[in-house]
Amino acid sequence: MKGYRSTHKRIRVGFVEPTLKEAEPGDLSLVLPYNTLKSIIEMIEALDKVTPGIASEHTLLYGVEAKFYSARPKLTGKFETEITGLYAGGDGAGITRGLAQAGACGVAMARDIIEKLQN
């Protein structure tokens, strides 16, 4: 909340014992969109009124940073995998890198499914 990146040292001198020992300290603002992070902070501040202390500077939040752009399953031109009827699209398939492309990919997959159902 102060805008500091979490580090092993800062966590070690804090009052909270991390529950996920394997987690790597970092900065959620580098992983989450600004509006999402702002909403989380507002929620924590609201919860602090019900459960005082939850909005402490020592509260730890965990976030996931996953980048799998190199993992690309084999797909047909219609985004179907080698398993008939299983489609992979959007960022999860490593073929798009933005919302517009992921949406277009979803439309193409849906059209292919509809076409197969009609045949």
Image (cartoon, grey):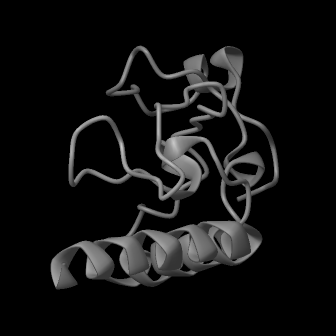
- Nearer to the camera, 50 or 68: 68
Q: Residue 17's x, y, as percent?
A: 39, 26
Q: Residue furthest front?
A: 119
Q: Residue at x 58, y 79 (%)?
A: 39
Report the quarter where the N terminus lies.
bottom right
Q: Is residue 103 above or below residue 55?
A: below
Task: Estimate the x, y position of residue 20 in percent, counting from the top left.
Answer: 36, 24
Horizontal placement of 114 versus 88: left or right? left
Q: Position of residue 31 (x, y in %)?
A: 68, 48
Judge left or right: residue 114 versus residue 15: left
Q: Residue furthest right?
A: 3
Residue at x-position 34% and y-position 54%: 87
Residue for point 81% across, 43% down: 4
Residue 63 visible, this angle: no
Does residue 68 sit above or below 77 in this rendering? Answer: above
Q: Quadrant of residue 12?
A: top right
**Of 3 and 52, which appears nearest the observer?**
3
Number of labelled discs? 0
The quadrant in which residue 101 appears is bottom right
The quadrant of the image that shows the C terminus is: bottom left
Residue 92 in the figure: left or right of residue 10: left
Who's the residue at 51% across and 40% down the image?
Answer: 64
Does residue 32 show up? yes
